Image (cartoon, grey):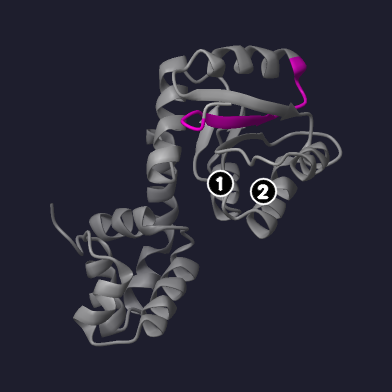
Amino acid sequence: MNSDVHTVVIVDDHLLLSGSLEKLINSFEGFQVLFHASNGRELQLKLKKESKKPSVILLDINMPVMDGFETAEWLTEHHPDIKFLALSMEDDEQTILKMLRKGAKGYLLKDIHPDKLKIALQETVSKGFYHSDKVATTMLHALHNNNKASEESFKENELIFLQLACSEMTYKEIADQMNLSPKTIDGYRQELFNRLHIKNRVGLVIYALKNNLIHI
């Protein structure tokens, strides 16, 4: 297989959908399906046998034996380097947030347009995540529900860190700017991630914009 080709694994118990997705993804330039599995347990077995790890996994939620939530937890714990996108018919906010908190780099609905799917795969490979309008809206709603308590409990250095984290500075550069150790900066980052229920810097930016902590 060409080293420039990004591999995709499909985890879904609907064989017809998996087959259709495989044909579609194989038609995208730079992408090829490595294999598909019908549930999380089968994914575990196949990953052990494969010498090459996939670039992206498309993960269904409702599956027998081992569902998407359980599989997401397992992937985050045992293969944190493998990016995965949730793929589901469910579009309720709680399900979306639950998958994002378990490590999903994005959330796609099964009726997604082929062009959007291609963009989602490309951005997941290049940026490390894909946040659709639906996901962004869901995150904003979730942050809005926690805004007052979060705002009141900010410490001065946490607020400074939050503002700097919304820039293009690396965490090391932020540590230097604040004259703090990288370990302390890591502590601020993890504390904010936990308190605001977000997974990455994108969530921090959305929160800061929503609360007028930064301006663009």
Q: As drawn, is 94 to the left or to the right of 151? A: right
Res 203 visible = yes
Above or below, comparing residue 142 to residue 96 in the picture: below
- Residue 154 picture location, percent across and down: 33, 79
Tell me the residue that label 1 is attached to.
104
Disc with the residue nearer the chain's start (1 vs 2): 2
The residue closer to the viewer here, 77 or 159, is: 77
- Residue 54 picture location, percent across and down: 61, 38
Q: As drawn, is 122 to the left or to the right of 206? A: right
The residue closer to the viewer here, 65 or 181, is: 181
For the residues labelled 1 and 2, the Cα–Cα distance comes to 7 Å
- Residue 122 picture location, percent across and down: 41, 31
Above or below, comparing residue 47 to residue 149 in the picture: above
Q: Amino acid at mark 1?
A: Ala
Residue displayed at 74% across by 49% down: 70
Q: Amino acid at mark 2?
A: Ala
Residue displayed at 65% across by 40% down: 52
- Residue 6 picture location, percent across and down: 51, 31
Residue displayed at 45% across by 75% down: 191
**Callout 1 touching callout 2 (CB < 8 Å):** yes
| Pointer 1 local density, CA inside 10 Å: few below 14, some 14–19, many at least 20 | many
Q: As drawn, is 138 to the left or to the right of 16? A: left
Tell me the residue that label 2 is attached to.
72
Name the quadrant containing residue 88.
Answer: top right
| Pointer 2 local density, CA inside 10 Å: few below 14, some 14–19, many at least 20 | many
Residue displayed at 28% across by 79% down: 175
Determine whether the residue tagged by mark 2 lies in a helix, strand or loop.
Answer: helix
Q: As drawn, is 202 to the left or to the right of 66? A: left
The residue closer to the viewer here, 42 or 208, is: 42
- Whether the magenta-drawn stretch holds residue 5 is answered as yes
- The magenta span reads 3-15
Q: Quadrant of the N terminus?
A: top right
